[in-house]
Amino acid sequence: MSLLDILYYPDPQLRTSASEVRDVDGNVAKLVDDMFATMYEAPGIGLAATQVNVHQQVVVIDVSEENDTPLTFINPKIIVAEGMAEMQEGCLSIPGVYETIKRPSEVRIAALDREGNPFEMDADGLLAVCIQHEIDHLQGKLFVDYLSTLKRNRIRKKLEKWVRDGADLDDIPEPVSRSR
Ligand code: NI
């Protein structure tokens, strides 16, 4: 397994729309494994292929405390979305930034697993938020897009300065854990 480089906002590649995976082959399985390694190392609870500059519809998630519940979603689609809830979100591509975002609180997802088998899954709570956040990434959307232009511009300037200064995660004042 190898660690992949994570793109940071406002890198324009984060705005790319990912293509559907046609064939869940060994290359996709390797991408999944590398994405899990990268996500656990960060550490984060979710990662979309877009964030490692691979523009295929692949998402990995593990919202468990013990990092022992890896979930792979290939070509994920939200087929049901209900309710509404607010939760604080972070993102591995926007380190040090945490904002409260409103989204549907319960979703049903259809996707393929790491072996290419179709499955459906109901999610609520943190998992529901995380899946929606990652699917947004595959469509070139970031959680800061839900904020006001003023707030988003402030975050963009902060991140641009941080990248200019060498993108050292130790410089980020808030913890980067539990980010997606
Ligand atoms: Ni994210």
Image: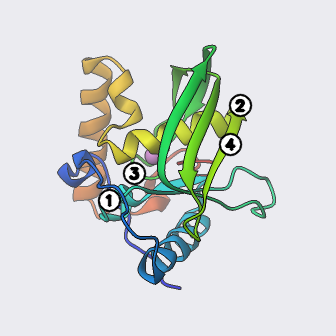
Residue linked to disc 1: 7
Secondary structure at badge 2 equals strand
Q: Position of residue 55 (x, y in %)?
A: 29, 60
Q: Is 90 rendered above or below residue 19?
A: above
User: Does any portion of residue 89 appear in the rendered image?
Assistant: yes
Q: Residue at x 59, y 49 (%)?
A: 175
Instruction: Kindly report which numbered mark, 3 or 4, lies closer to the viewer in this rendering.
Output: 4
- Among the two numbered marks 1 and 3 on one chain, the one whose residue lies closer to the N terminus: 1
Instruction: Kindly report which numbered mark, 3 or 2, lies closer to the viewer in this rendering.
Output: 2
Secondary structure at badge 3 equals loop
Few, some or many residues within 10 Å of mark 3 (<14, 14–19, 20+): many
* Mark seen at residue 93: 3
* Beta carbon of the mark 3 residue lies under 8 A of ligand 1: yes
Q: Amino acid at mark 2?
A: Asp
Instruction: Kindly report which numbered mark, 2 or 4, lies closer to the viewer in this rendering.
Output: 4
Secondary structure at badge 1 equals loop
- Among the two numbered marks 3 and 4 on one chain, the one whose residue lies closer to the N terminus: 3
Few, some or many residues within 10 Å of mark 4 (<14, 14–19, 20+): few
Residue linked to disc 4: 121
Q: Residue at x 30, y 46 (%)?
A: 159
Are the two marked residues, 1 and 3, in contact with CB atoms closer than 8 angstroms? yes
Instruction: Kindly report which numbered mark, 1 or 2, lies closer to the viewer in this rendering.
Output: 2
Q: CA distance from mark 2 to mark 4?
A: 10 Å
